[in-house]
Amino acid sequence: MEESKQWYESKGVLSSLVIIAASVAGMAGYVIDEKAQAEIVEFVFMAVTAIGGAISLYCRIKATKVIRTAKGE
């Protein structure tokens, strides 16, 4: 693996967090089946992606400096 990404961009990490949350919920008496867990992971992934895009757009709009290419053009 040569490419990298943030932890919240990983479906594996998000799946693990949902499984942990489902386990804790199970201990509290709530049952979350595997299908619901998969749907939660997909929803969280889409929400994180949308929020990240919105933040990027907002920051670019509010930026006060011009973006240059690597050659300094």
Image (cartoon, grey):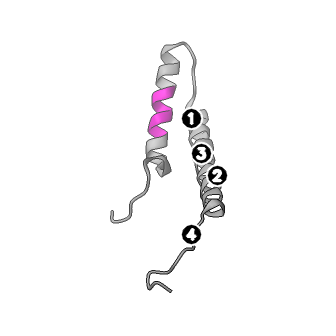
Q: Amino acid at mark 1?
A: Gln
Q: Which residue is mark 3?
A: 42
Q: Dot 3: what SS?
A: helix
Residue that mark 2 sits on: 50
Name the residue rendered at 56%, 41% in the picture.
41
Residue where numbered disc 4 is placed: 65
Q: Is residue 73 above or below residue 33?
A: below
In the image, taking residue 54 as reference, residue 38 lies left or right, namely left
Percent across and percent down for residue 62 are 64, 60
Upstream in the sequence, badge 2 or badge 4? 2
Name the residue nearer the viewer: 65 or 44.
65
Can you give x and y, in whole percent of width and height, for residue 13 in the image? 44, 43
Q: Quadrant of residue 57?
A: bottom right
Is 6 placed above or below 64 here?
Answer: above
Q: Are marks 3 and 2 in contact (CB under 8 Å)?
A: no
Which residue is depicted at the point 65% across and 57% down?
58
The residue at the far front in this view is 64
How far apart are labels 2 and 1 at the CA level? Answer: 20 Å
Separation (CA) of disc 3 from disc 1 = 9 Å
Looking at the rendered structure, which numbered label has been put on residue 37?
1
Left or right of 23 on screen, residue 32: right
Separation (CA) of disc 3 from disc 4: 36 Å
Foreground disc of the pair 3, 2: 2
Instruction: Indicate whether 66 appears above or below 24.
Output: below
Q: In the image shown, does 5 or 52 lie closer to the viewer?
A: 52
Side of 10 relative to 47 (left or right): left
